[in-house]
């Protein structure tokens, strides 16, 4: 073992002198393997191993620097001081980026202190963000140091951002202290992070944030409450979230639609429907509500989609409705979804004359898998649009290819068949 380690050290030294950083890296990776950790030769040469690693960090290419970072972590605390020196060297350029990441991986109190100090002193916003992320990855041991940074206006946002990365219960108390901070970004980050925890102190904070003057904070509050449907009766979430459907900020209103869909009650569906068919509602919000009604997986949600199809007048919205109806996967609702689509086919609704709508209906019926749709689909083959016919053929094949094929062949023998449908059936058989 000793001879092997000495040989690797000699190879590493020769490669270093020749500037062969790839070979130096390979030697170091073998030398710092776990089985070598306590070997006297490794302990004796630890300073030299560190020197080699620093050389690669300074002279290597991107991939070599990325790989050597893992070696620094294995070297442990001996690497902290030279890495801090790099961190404090404003001329070290991109090396500081690697130093920050490695110090974060070391998770040592001295490394934490250096990163916290770096956050307080550097003007480089990119490096600040990386340092904040590194502290977040360190976890619980960094919480105390980061909590102290909350007291300073200059470091509060970075401290909040770092704490938000940690996602351990210990961050709740310090973050509760900044939910009323004057800075919008701090409030939004704190609300978002707190939403990850099931703690009795948090729901009142989220409810209060629903009326925050900043849209970003309101949105995070809505999203946070949307995952607490277990409390929807206790907190009367339907009444609290429904007004946000009318929020001046579109993203807040869209988040409210998603939140109500998760509550999943008939009353929630009703509120969504009212906003959906309201003329002033932006089309982006209407599309989100259409999806929300389908996500609810309730019969009332599907029925409201059917009503909306008959009351709305935009092709984009019609198309979205027939599309989401085809994505219904709940076995108790697929029959109802199929019937709604078939009722649209049988109706005199102007949407049925639009090729894209007709294609989407065919696709959705094929996805739902109900063979009752075979005859109605065949009747749509009278359409002269080749794309529509191709979608219908694909849907028929998806439903029951043998049955559909037989029905198409039988139709050709029907003397009362209209010319357009005969042409469509013939084309469909040719595509089979």
Image: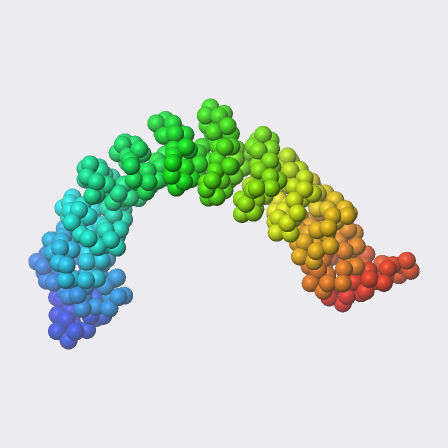
Q: Quadrant of the N terminus?
A: bottom left
Q: Residue furthest left?
A: 44
Determine whether, in the image, residue 352 is placed left or right of residue 41.
right
Q: Is residue 397 rendered to the left or right of residue 15? A: right
Q: Is residue 39 above or below residue 282?
A: below
Residue 85, position as x, y percentages in the image? 11, 56
Kindly indicate the quadrant of the structure image that contains residue 4.
Answer: bottom left
Q: Is residue 299 left or right of residue 65?
A: right
Residue under the image location 31 percent in, 34 percent down: 179
Q: Residue at the front extreme?
A: 280
The one of 303 and 108 positioned closer to us in this rendering: 303
Residue 175 appearing in the image: no
In the image, what residue occupies the spot 36% across and 30% down? 205
Q: In the depicted view, which residue is nearer to us: 412 or 186?
A: 186
Q: Nearer the viewer, residue 37 or 315?
A: 315
Which residue is situated farthest in the bottom direction here?
Answer: 18
User: Looking at the image, can residue 321 be seen?
Assistant: yes
- Residue 17's spot in the image, x, y percent? 12, 73
Q: Residue at x 56, y 47 (%)?
A: 283
Question: On the image, which quarter does residue 182 sit in?
Answer: top left
Pinpoint residue 96: horizontal percent, then vertical percent: 19, 58
- Residue extending farthest to the right is 415
């Amino acid at each position: 073992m000793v001879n092997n380690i000495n040989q690797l050290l000699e190879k590493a030294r020769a490669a270093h002198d020749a500037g062969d950083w790839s070979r130096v890296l390979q030697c170091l990776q073998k030398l710092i393997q776990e089985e070598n950790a306590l070997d006297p030769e490794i302990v004796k040469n630890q300073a030299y191993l560190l020197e080699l690693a620093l050389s690669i960090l300074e002279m290597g290419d991107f991939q070599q620097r990325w790989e050597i970072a893992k070696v620094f972590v294995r070297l442990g605390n001996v690497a902290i001081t030279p890495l801090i020196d790099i961190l404090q060297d404003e001329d070290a350029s991109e090396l500081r980026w690697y130093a920050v990441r490695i110090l974060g991986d070391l998770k040592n109190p001295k490394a934490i202190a250096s990163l916290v100090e770096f956050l307080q002193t550097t003007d480089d916003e990119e490096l600040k963000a990386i340092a904040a992320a590194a502290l977040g990855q360190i976890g619980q041991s960094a919480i105390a140091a980061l909590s102290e940074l909350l007291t300073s206006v200059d470091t509060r946002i970075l401290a909040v951002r770092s704490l938000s990365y940690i996602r351990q219960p210990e961050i709740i108390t310090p973050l509760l202290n900044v939910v009323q901070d004057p800075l919008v970004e701090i409030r939004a980050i704190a609300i978002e992070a707190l939403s990850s925890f099931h703690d009795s102190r948090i729901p009142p904070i989220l409810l209060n944030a629903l009326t925050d003057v900043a849209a970003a904070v309101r949105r995070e509050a809505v999203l946070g409450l949307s995952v607490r449907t277990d409390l929807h009766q206790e907190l009367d979430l339907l009444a609290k979230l429904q007004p946000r459907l009318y929020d001046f900020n579109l993203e807040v209103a869209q988040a409210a639609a998603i939140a109500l869909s998760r509550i999943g009650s008939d009353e929630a569906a009703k509120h969504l429907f009212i906003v959906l068919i309201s003329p002033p509602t932006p089309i982006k919000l209407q599309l989100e509500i259409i999806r929300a009604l389908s996500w609810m997986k309730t019969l009332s949600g599907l029925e409201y989609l059917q009503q909306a199809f008959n009351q709305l007048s935009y092709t984009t919205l019609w198309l979205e409705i027939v599309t989401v109806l085809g994505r219904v996967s709940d076995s108790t609702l697929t029959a109802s979804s199929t019937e709604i689509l078939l009722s649209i086919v049988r109706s005199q609704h102007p949407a049925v004359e639009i090729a894209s709508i007709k294609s989407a209906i065919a696709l959705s019926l094929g996805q739902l898998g109900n063979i009752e749709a075979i005859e109605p689909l065949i009747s749509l083959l009278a359409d002269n649009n080749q794309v529509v016919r191709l979608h219908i053929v694909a849907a028929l094949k998806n439903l029951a290819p043998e049955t559909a094929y037989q029905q198409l062949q039988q139709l050709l023998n029907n003397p009362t068949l209209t010319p357009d449908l005969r042409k469509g059936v013939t084309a469909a058989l040719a595509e089979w």
